[in-house]
Structure formats: structure tokens, C-alpha cells
Amino acid sequence: MRLMRVSDAAELAAAYSRNRDHLAYWDPARSAEFYTEEWQAADIASRLVAHDAGVDHLFGLFTGDEIVGRFNLTGIVRGPFQSSSLGYWVDSRYTGRGLASSAVQAIIDTAREDLGLHRIEASTLLDNIGSQRVLLKAGFQQIGMAPQYLKIAGTWQDHNLYQILLHG
């Protein structure tokens, strides 16, 4: 796993295209443009600007040169909050192998040791049992349920909310 680069755009577009049906249930509705190298390059470039500003970290999970997952720490808030949101997905061919669990643990370690964060939050659709297992295994605790929290697959959907406290 490493920080994404603009040069990863073609591979990221291919990964999203390959997983289009797999991710459709869990993701916001996507335009056709989203699946292009150009769109992904522009998105990575803007996220790298946010990374340089200290508010986002975009990681790719690779096997060789192929992207098999994407993990994001976004919306980093400093000051007394020291918190971020975690989002991720794993290629349909690699689910159930512990890759998400290992990557989430590595992100927790980075957030604690390198970024000095106090808290990470995450959310899942109510029926996303696999992602809930990943979070709970990593030490996240469910802290509630948010009605109509995110617009996923074109519909405002309820989400379970999780957090992990990294210090204290």
C-alpha cells in the first residue's frame, strides 16, 4: 500500500471499471466520465493538493502494478479534534482474504504514529457485514446509526457509524 500518484490514473480507472458492478451497490452513482483515466488523474491531482495541505491521504493497495483497493483518510481536522474519516474498497477478486483488515490496521498505525490523529471515523451501509467486520476487527466501535446519511446508489441511505480512538 502506498500514496497514490497521478501516474496511477490509468490503473485506477481500470480497477474502477473492472469493479463497476461490484461497487455500484456501495458507492455514489457515478457518471461514465468517472471511469476514465482523465477523470481519475484530475481527482488524484486534486487529492494530492489536499494531501500536501494535510487534509487527505489517498492510498492505493497494489498487487504488482495492479490496483486492488483504495483507502482514504479524508477531511482531516486538526486543533482540538485531530480526527479523520476512513473510506475504502477492495477489488471483488480479492475480498475475503484479509487485505482490507491489514490495510485498515496499517492506516490506523499511520494515523496514530505519523499524523498524530486522535480519532478515525467510518460508516457502512446497514447490511455491509464484511466492512463492519473489518472495522470491528481493527478496534473500531459502533457509535450509532445515522438515518439517510449518504446518497449511495442514487438513494439517501442509513449508515452505521464507527470510530476508533487512537490515544488515551
Image (spheres, grey):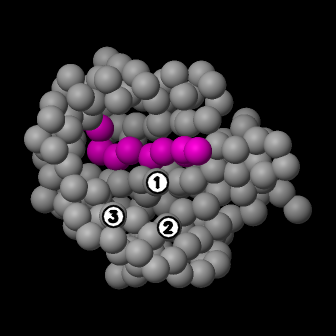
Residue 43 in picture, x, y percent from top left: 35, 29
Q: Mark 1 highlights which residue?
A: 87
Task: Determine which residue is flagged by label 3.
Answer: 151
Q: Residue furthest right?
A: 168
Whether residue 67 appears in magenta in the rendering, the answer is yes
Foreground tag (2 vs 3):
3
What type is the residue that disc 2 sits on?
Ser
The answer to whether residue 124 is above or below residue 55 is below
Q: Residue at x 22, y 56 (%)?
A: 29
Estimate the x, y position of residue 5 in percent, counting from the top left.
40, 22
Residue visible at 59% across and 71% down in the picture: 162
Residue found at x 48% / y 45%? 72
Give the amino acid type for the residue marked by disc 3 in the picture. Lys
**Above or below 88: residue 51:** above
The magenta stretch is 66-75
Asked which secondary structure carries label 1, the reply is strand
Residue sitting nearer the eye, 81 or 70: 81
Taking 29 as reference, is 148 left or right?
right
Question: Is residue 97 or residue 113 the one in the foreground?
Answer: 113
Where residue 32 appears, as percent x and y from the top left, is 11, 41
138, 29: nearer the viewer: 29
Q: Main secondary structure of the magenta part?
A: strand
Q: Is residue 79 above or below residue 145?
A: above
Which of the two discs, 2 and 3, labels the residue nearer the N terminus? 2
Q: In the rendered structure, which amino acid carries the disc numbered 1?
A: Gly
Q: Closer to the camera: disc 3 or disc 1?
A: 3
Number of numbered discs: 3
User: Quick one: label 1, few (<14), some, or many (20+) residues within 10 Å?
Assistant: some
The answer to whether residue 87 shows anywhere in this view is: yes
For the C terminus, the quadrant is bottom right
Residue placed under numbered mark 2 in the picture:
123
